């Protein structure tokens, strides 16, 4: 029986050509922009690390968005507290004016009217909503905004912290609304107890100013924490992106050099195979 000449041809050269052709295709894909670890089999360890980095980047993107909302809420709260402090200082000035005893009989009514207007401004400031439609100064449990795995920030105080249980002296407490209404009443009090009532309201107003000042100080700390967290996330974003690029992105220059080498090797292998293929059966039998 006559056997095929292919039976005597070197299979190693054929296998080598296939292997080199596959390597060439891989390098061409890298040059074309394909990820160096497009498949886990390319580099299982690098692929797993890149996948973890992608998860971290997703988490940090969410935390960065949270920081944006927290920063907005913190700024709104700070502005509202500043409004209240300014209003309380003005109210104190009006009370002192009423307490001089040198004003006309109609002046107390005018002063009290302005105090009531300031109190209405406070109500508006405490009832405003944040940029997501929620209450800026909420009730109940405070809103803790995540800005890391175990890191949170309270962007704005709750309504109770701003409005309730303000020290008015002598161990007593009142709400901000009560202090303002009592101040308006004390201004118009022309009875013998009026002087004592106005003196008491000066103490109450000082207590309210102290409360708001403390809250404003805390807002400064909150804003500092937000800015610090933002800087850390920005730095982490750069570090993660750099490391992921090292793992995923192909070195185009290196891939081009490797591609040229493979093409040269393929040409050499094909030349060897062609020479072998030209030999006759008698050449193999010699």
Image: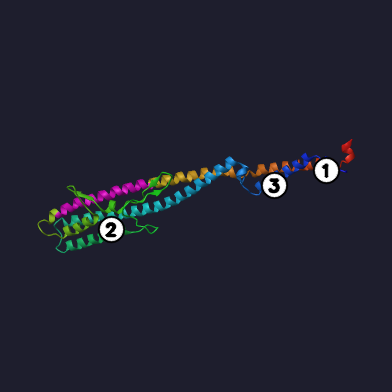
Nearest to the observer: residue 101 or residue 49: 49
Depth check, mark 2 against mark 3: the one in front is: 3
Q: Are marks 3 and 1 in contact (CB under 8 Å)?
A: no
Residue 255 is left or right of residue 193, and the answer is right
Q: Which residue is mark 2?
A: 122
Q: Quadrant of the N terminus?
A: top right
Spatial CA span between label 1 and label 2: 97 Å
Cα separation, mark 3 vs mark 1, equals 27 Å
- For label 2, the crowd category at 10 Å Cα-Cα, with few meaning under 14, some 14 to 19 and many 20 or more, is many
Where is residue 242 drawn, in percent x and y? 55, 43
Kindly indicate whether the residue at mark 2 contacts the one at mark 1 (C-beta within 8 angstroms).
no
Whichever of callouts 1 and 2 sits on the residue coming sooner in the sequence is 1
User: Would residue 128 appear left or right of 119 to someone viewing this image?
Assistant: right
Viewer-nearest of discs 1 and 2 = 1
| Residue tagged 1 | 6
SS assignment at label 2: helix
Can you identify the residue that label 3 sits on?
25
In terms of image quadrants, where is residue 90? bottom left
Q: Is residue 65 magenta?
A: no
* Residue positioned 13% across, 53% down in the render: 196
Seen at 43% across and 52% down, the residue is 68
Q: Nearer the viewer, residue 39 or 233?
A: 39
Who comes first in sequence, dot 2 or dot 3?
3
Residue 254 lies in what quarter of the image?
A: top right
Magenta stretch bounds: 197-223
């Amino acid at each position: 029986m006559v056997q095929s000449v292919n039976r005597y041809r070197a299979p190693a050269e054929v296998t080598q050509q296939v292997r080199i052709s596959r390597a060439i295709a891989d390098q061409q894909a890298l040059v074309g922009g394909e990820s160096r670890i497009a498949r886990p089999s390319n580099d299982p360890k690098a692929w797993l690390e890149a996948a973890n980095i992608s998860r971290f980047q997703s988490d940090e993107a969410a935390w960065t968005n949270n920081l944006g909302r927290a920063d907005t809420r913190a700024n709104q709260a700070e502005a509202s507290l500043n409004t209240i402090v300014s209003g309380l200082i003005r109210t104190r000035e009006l009370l002192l004016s009423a307490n001089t005893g040198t004003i006309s009989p109609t002046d107390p009514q005018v002063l009290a009217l302005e105090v009531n207007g300031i109190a209405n401004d406070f109500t508006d400031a405490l009832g405003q909503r944040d940029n997501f439609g929620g209450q800026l100064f909420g009730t109940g449990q405070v809103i803790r905004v995540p800005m890391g795995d175990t890191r949170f920030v309270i962007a704005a105080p709750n309504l109770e912290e701003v409005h309730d249980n303000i020290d008015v002296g002598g161990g007593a407490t009142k709400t901000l609304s009560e202090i303002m209404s009592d101040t308006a009443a004390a201004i118009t009090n022309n009875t013998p107890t009026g002087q004592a009532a106005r003196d008491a309201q000066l103490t109450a107003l000082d207590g309210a100013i102290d409360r708001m000042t403390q809250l404003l100080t805390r807002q400064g700390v909150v804003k500092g924490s937000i800015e610090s967290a933002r800087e850390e996330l920005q730095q982490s974003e750069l570090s993660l992106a750099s490391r992921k690029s090292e793992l995923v992105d192909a070195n185009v220059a290196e891939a081009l050099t490797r591609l040229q080498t493979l093409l040269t090797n393929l040409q050499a292998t094909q030349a060897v195979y062609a020479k072998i293929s030209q030999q006759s059966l008698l050449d193999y039998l010699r």
